[in-house]
Amino acid sequence: QLSTQKEELTAQISTMVLANQEKSSASEKVPNTSNELKEVQNPEFWHHPNTYAMNSNSDMMTLADITPRIHTVSFRTKRRSTRTHHNNYLNPAHYVPSNTSVRAVVLGGADADASVNGQSKNNGVMLFKFLEDGTLPNGARSRLRGCRVSANSYGDISSERAFATLYRLSCAHPGQPIIDKEVTGWVFFNGKVGIKGKPLMRDNKVMTWAGVSGALSGIAQAAQYAQSVQAIGPYGATSVVPSSQIAPFAAYGGASKAADTLSAYYVKRAEQYHPVIQVGSGNVVTVVFKDGFYLEPDEDKSQHAMNQVKAEEEAQRLIAANHEGNSTDMNFTVPPEVLGKIDHANSLSANLTGVLR
């Protein structure tokens, strides 16, 4: 038995020695890692858990010689949109910029003056009504439906068109202040500036009579000269009217003067009978504004309206105060005994009146 126990003990010792040798050989193969390397963050970024996040030389050997996996991360910066806060009144609800177009109908036509001085006179009055809201640049809309605009006009006989220049705009939207202000612009018809109309010449007869009067003046003047005779004397030739031709000479002279006056009259009348371009109502046109304007009442009109409102409020306040003062003065109380005496006197007077009856 002792020999058997000795053999078992020897086998256990040899087993322990072999295990110790294996542990020592394993410790020599795997170097000791430093404390800094043991605290590696984000180990999922590397190939193997035994791969270190930093290189360190120990015994002239590189502890981490494996190339780490590189993860590429891309970022797309979000573009920050900067919004500009414009003036509240610089929007289509309050301001109509230049080159705004509105479709309109002619309510009041005109016979546009197409004479030589017609453009300088520019006295033909026209009236337009807007059929829709204004179309601003970039497709925006402005509240111009139903507004009216007046215009002056003149005609051009060569193009047979009446040219209108805008004068005043008026709008009366429900629940909003009335707008009445001066504007500038043009009127287009069928894609061209100016409204196509019918030319009318009325000076034909007048010019004919002016020509006839001028011819009669010349004939009378020639007949007047025919009544004189040439007298040759020492000082040359002179025209002499014989005594027998004095009456015809005077008559022809008067006729010549009258014909001259009549010709001048017809010429002036022909200037009044200038050509016109007839434009009737009902034509659909396009109004284009030349200058921008605010869809608000003018400052002077707004101030006047505010002053009127303040004056009315002040008058109402004074009337109310006066009424309260009067009601306070008349509000007195009568003692009960006095009221009883008054009732007793009234009853006595009623009884006496019944007895007398």
Image (spheres, rainbow, N blue to C red):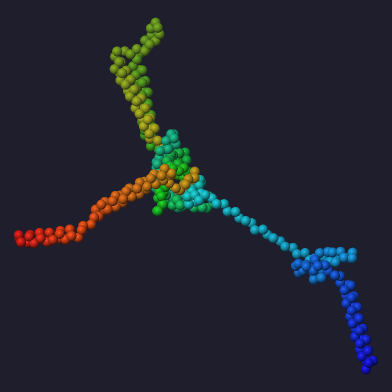
Q: Position of residue 66 (x, y in %)?
A: 83, 66
User: Which residue lies most toward the bottom here?
Assistant: 1
Q: Nearer the viewer, residue 252 or 316?
A: 316
Residue drawn at the location 78% of the way across and 68% of the way down: 39
Q: Quadrant of residue 182?
A: top left
Q: Quadrant of the N terminus?
A: bottom right
Q: Position of residue 132 (x, y in %)?
A: 45, 52
User: Which residue lies most toward the right here?
Assistant: 3
Q: How many marks?
A: 0
Residue drawn at the location 43% of the way across and 44% of the way down: 298
Residue drawn at the location 46% of the way across and 42% of the way down: 184
Q: Position of residue 320 (x, y in %)?
A: 31, 51
Q: Nearer the viewer, residue 250 or 244?
A: 250
Q: Quadrant of residue 181?
A: top left
Q: Is residue 276 at least partly visible in the picture?
A: no
Q: Nearer the viewer, residue 76 or 24?
A: 24
Q: Nearer the viewer, residue 302 or 46?
A: 46
